Amino acid sequence: MPENLDCGIPYTLIFPDINLKDKKVLIQLPDGLKQFSLVIANCIRERYNAEPIIHMENIYGACDLQYNQIFSILNPDIIIHIGHSEYPNYLSPSSLPDNIRNRVVFVKALSKIDVDEALVLRALEILNNYNVKNISIALTAQHTHLYNKISNIILDKKYNIIESKALYPYYEPGQIIGCDFRPVLDKKIDGYIFLGGGEFHPLGLYLATLKPIAQIDLYSNSVRDFTPIGTKYYKKRLFSISKAIEANHWGVIIGLKTGQYRPSILNIIIKMLSKKQYVLLSSENINEINLRSVDNDWYDAFIITSCPRIPIDDLIDYEKPVLSPGEAYMALTGKIDKYMFPW
Ligand code: SF4
């Protein structure tokens, strides 16, 4: 049976049914939860008599388990990965290989903040402005337990909901991550109520769908129309793609994070580049500093095959086009009538 662990933090931790007693465990947390790392480590030590190690490295998602280095050097019995669900193997074959699958535990961290009906009603008002009839609910991993409550409020107000199905073991109903929106993609959907903080997830959802989004942020107890923000980014992306259409010399960047190596996408891109010139580049982390260190006059444009958010969130103002795989497809085929993101 899964076990709910209340460590006295604003999140309930849900441990799957696994024996952690007396184990040496390495705890991975997203940056937002690291402030609770000591409390969580002590809580796990007390509950399971386990010996915890808190992993300090930045963890961007379950695509970034860093298992090679961790098991070859520290060799804990188990990696406890908190706050993200398993990264889909259809996006990367090396995200969680069979030989370590039983040594990695994904622990949900569900926010204890409840959603107030008034917030949902304000979100519905925003979607009304866009004449949205068929609504989908999208949410981050921390709020998946609120899907049914929001759904019932919306149905009470006589709106249509396009129901989302779980995709186990990856997603609960409505759950999205920054590069995969599968649970909430349906042609019948006219607009979204998104539950979660910040810009990262709603921006990805907007670019993947180009549909209106009303964002409910429980951490700031606020609601906003995310659509104009998404539109602003969308226009910038179209500009980058149009600049890349004339590019002849391409840099194709391969990701070395365990869940960001995507050989099938890489092969498609290499085939599409058969009439151009290209160089393959590899890196675990990709940022402006290491891109600039290799960039010279030869390169006209870059494609990042690892995390499709890097071109959008980190390198959007780079002076040469830096594209995600879907955007590269548009530039290389000249098919720019339908925006493609992320893949
Ligand atoms: S958006 Fe990037 S960091 Fe987030 S899960 Fe996807 S590949 Fe990983």
Image: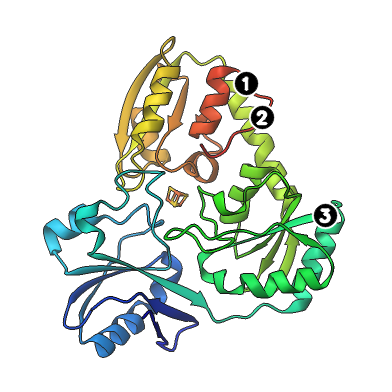
**CA distance for labels 3 and 2:** 23 Å
> According to the image, label 3 marks what residue?
133
Mark 1, secondary structure of its residue:
loop
Check contact, mark 3 vs mark 2: CB within 8 A.
no
List the single residue furthest toward the top.
Answer: 275
Mark 3, secondary structure of its residue:
loop
What is the three-letter code of the residue carrying label 2?
Lys
**CA distance for labels 1 and 3:** 30 Å
Ranked by sequence position, the earlier of labels 3 and 2 is 3
Mark 1 closeness class: few <14, some 14–19, many ≥20 residues within 10 Å: few
Residue 288 in view in this figure: yes
Q: Give the residue drawn at x 38%, y 41%.
A: 286
Between residues 266 and 168, which one lies in front from this camera angle?
A: 168
> According to the image, label 1 marks what residue?
335
Between residues 24 and 297, which one lies in front from this camera angle?
A: 24
Give coordinates of residue 156: x percent, y percent. 81, 73
Q: Is residue 219 above or below residue 270?
A: below
Is the residue at mark 1 in contact range of ligand 1, meaning its CB lies under 8 Å from it?
no
Is the residue at mark 3 in contact range of ligand 1, meaning its CB lies under 8 Å from it?
no
Q: Give the residue drawn at x 19%, y 59%.
A: 70
What is the three-letter code of the residue carrying label 3?
Lys
Between residues 127 and 37, which one lies in front from this camera angle?
A: 127
Image quadrant where one finds the N terminus? bottom left
> According to the image, label 2 marks what residue?
338
Ranked by sequence position, the earlier of labels 1 and 3 is 3
What is the three-letter code of the residue carrying label 1?
Lys
Residue 320 in view in this figure: no
Q: Give residue 302's mark.
A: none
Give coordinates of residue 63: x percent, y percent. 37, 52
Give coordinates of residue 60: x percent, y percent. 41, 56
